[in-house]
Structures are given as structure tokens and as C-alpha cells.
Image (tube, rainbow, N blue to C red):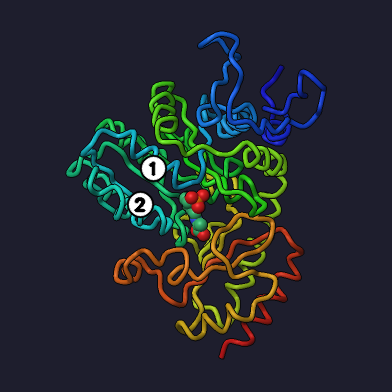
Amino acid sequence: MKEMKFETKVIHVGGEPDPTTGAIMPPIYQTSTYVQSSPGEHKGYEYTRSHNPTRTRLEECLASIEGANHCLVTASGLSASSLIMHMLPKGSKILCGDDVYGGTYRLFSKVFPDIHHYKFVDTTNLKNLENEISDFKPALIWLETPTNPLLKISDIKAISDLAKKVQALVVVDNTFMSPYFQNPLHHGADMVLHSMTKFINGHSDVVGGAIMMNSQELRDKLFFYQNAIGPCQSPFDSWLVLRGLKTLAVRMKAHEKNALEIASYLENHPKVEKVVYPGLKSHPQHDLAKKQMKGFGGMITFFLKGGLSESRLFLENVKLFALAESLGGVESLVDHPAIMTHASIPKEVRESLGIFDNLIRLSVGIEDVGDLKNDLEHALAKVN
Ligand code: P1T
């Protein structure tokens, strides 16, 4: 049979009817342990921290849609990032993109510096990055593309080629695009990381993470640390993600359609200074986005004319866009990164990157786009 398309895989891979009952939906194996017939003789499952059949089904589906041989599902996006750090030999050098999720920055700048060495650089500037790679000689390059919150785009293929010259691993945090719009392994990355909390689950009711890779060796090392440290996802949460995943393709198309319309609306609004969205021609890496991604996603960043008080007026007056951390749910969310999701980045670092108090981040949901525009229009009208 020909390889299934994405829309079919999300529904069928890992979704075989239950062999004992024929139930069309996968059972939630809500169990911590499994009976053995003799010590060490079991059906492949010993203890749910190590393996769980509901989680195995989710891992199969995620590996297949990211085009990977293997997937490990973890308790959160950040626990997935931590596992990758634990797997590296002590004293490893990590070259990380300068604009990353605030929690990733906190993990790399506050938790792991006793163990590894980190350098944050602009990975969108290839010439500069090439010099950094040959000077610093990293063991691993960490890319978030598009970045959170500035939506900067790094060239995965070109960077993976540079990394190979110094035998560095490349990890891509693909949370913003989801496997529907971008598959970093196809461009030469070694590992893909997702916060499943976002688009993959899509319903703002689960926290989870995933790492996909082709190498059996990397998978086995990461699995060792996952089992030894313990950040596993509960069977019920894995089941919820399997359920959310079924509509990933339709949701991503709807997010993008709405986001494209809202980005152009904001770009023409007199109270808006600048809009950043990969699907706009004005995005500095629009051509790279078209080449490397299959779509532009549902995240928009924009700068209001003014400062914190204008931002507060806007944020206090939106009604459909809920002011909340996180992103990627069916409902629209709005975030003020400087005070909320990226507050753990020191102000001077944040501002050197361009994350100012007038920066607003939208996670455009799949509601009616007219209603969403009305909501923005109403809140923008309140801004003096
Ligand atoms: O929240 P958690 O599932 O642990 O995922 C962390 C994470 C990793 N990578 C990216 C790109 C992310 O955006 C996140 C989490 N981000 C938010 C909570 C946020 O509002 O930006």
C-alpha cells in the first residue's frame, strides 16, 4: 500500500481497533504496573514510568507524522528539553538561538550551566553562525524556528550542513509549526522537539512533550534518561493527545487561514507599528519560510504604537482573545511576553532582542475570523 497522507496518518496510525473488544478508540491503559507470569516474563510492559500502551500508540502516530523512526513522549515540553541536556556528556557546548521560549532560556541559563556551556547567538545570520560554529565547536545546536516570540526563521538545512562539519547534533524545537507545517528531520536535523501542550494536542487541556529522531542510538540514550529520571506522561493525558491529534491537519489549516487574514488586517491598522508573521511579504525571511515550511502557522507577533500603558489598555479590552500564557489551542489567546512568558529573560537581554513592552503575541484560534477581527478592532479602539 502507498504511504498514507498526513490527514490519514493522524487518524489511523496507532489507532487500530482494540484487539480484545474491537473498541474503535484506543483504551486508556490507566495502570501503573503489569502482571508478570514469571520474573522477567511479561508482554513487553513492566511499569508505566517506562512504557504504557496508550503512550506507545501516541508515540507511533507522532513518529509517523514527523517522518521519524522513533518518538518519545514526555511529561512536558521542558522535560523533553531537559532529557536532551541530560543525555549530553558533562561539559558539552551548546550553541542556542538567541530568541527562544522564556522557559527554555531559563533552563539553559539557570539550571544546566553547572553542567554544560551555553552560548546564545542569532542563528538567522548564517555567515555569523558559521564563524561561531568554527570558534565555539558546539556538541549541539539548538534551534527554535520560527522563534517564540519574534518568529525569526533559521535555515535548518544550511545549519545542519554546517553542524555536520564539526559533528554537532542539531535539535529543532518545532512547536510553533507542528509536524503539519514543518518536518525538520527532512532538512537534516537530528532531533525534533515539541511542546505537545500546544498545537499537537490543540485543546489547552494537557501538558506534554515529544522528541522525534531517526537514530536508534539517540532514542535509546534518551529513553535511558527518561526512565531513570521519570518525566513520563500519564496514560489519560496521552489518550487526550491522541484524541486531539486526529484533527491536527484541519486545525492547522484553519489556524493559518485566520492568521493570514488577521496579520494583513493588523498590518494596515493605524495603531499598529509593525506586524511579524512568516506569511507576510514584509517578513524578513518570507522566502525561507516558503521554502522550508509547508505553511505559516497560527502565531502572530505585533508591536503597538506606544508602550506598556497602551499594551495594557489593549490586553484588558480583548474579549474573545483570552489573555493567557500558552498557545496552539482552538481558542484564540493573547500574550504579553515581556511580563508573562518571557519574564525570566533579563530585561536588557530581552530588549536587545527586540522584545519590548509594546510587543503582543497572538495565538490565532479557529473561531470565525470576522468575530476575531471585531474583537481586535474593539480593543484597539480603546488604545489612546
Ligand atoms: O510548557 P511546556 O509543555 O513545558 O513546553 C515548553 C515550550 C517549549 N518550546 C516552545 C517553543 C514553547 O513555546 C514552550 C512553552 N511555551 C509557552 C508556555 C508559551 O506561552 O510560550
- Please tell me which residue is depicted at 46% across the width and 61% down the height of the picture: 149
Residue located 70% across and 71% down the image: 320
Residue drawn at 41 percent across, 59 percent down: 102
Q: Is residue 200 above or below residue 60?
A: below
Q: Is residue 105 left or right of residue 213?
A: left
* 193 relative position to 20: left or right: left
Is the residue under label 2 in contact with that under label 1 (CB below 8 Å)?
A: yes
Q: Residue type at mark 1?
A: Ser
Where is residue 223, by image quadrant?
top left
| Location of residue 290 with respect to 4 vertically, above or below | below
Name, please, the residue furthest toward the bottom. 384
Task: Report x, y in % for residue 78.
Answer: 44, 47
**In the structure shown, which secondary structural element does the residue marked by tag 2 occupy?**
helix
Name the residue carrying label 1: 82
Label 2 sits on what residue type?
Leu
Q: Which residue is mark 2?
A: 107
Crowding at label 1, few (<14), some or many (≥20) Cα neighbours within 10 Å? some
For residue 197, say whether it is visible: yes
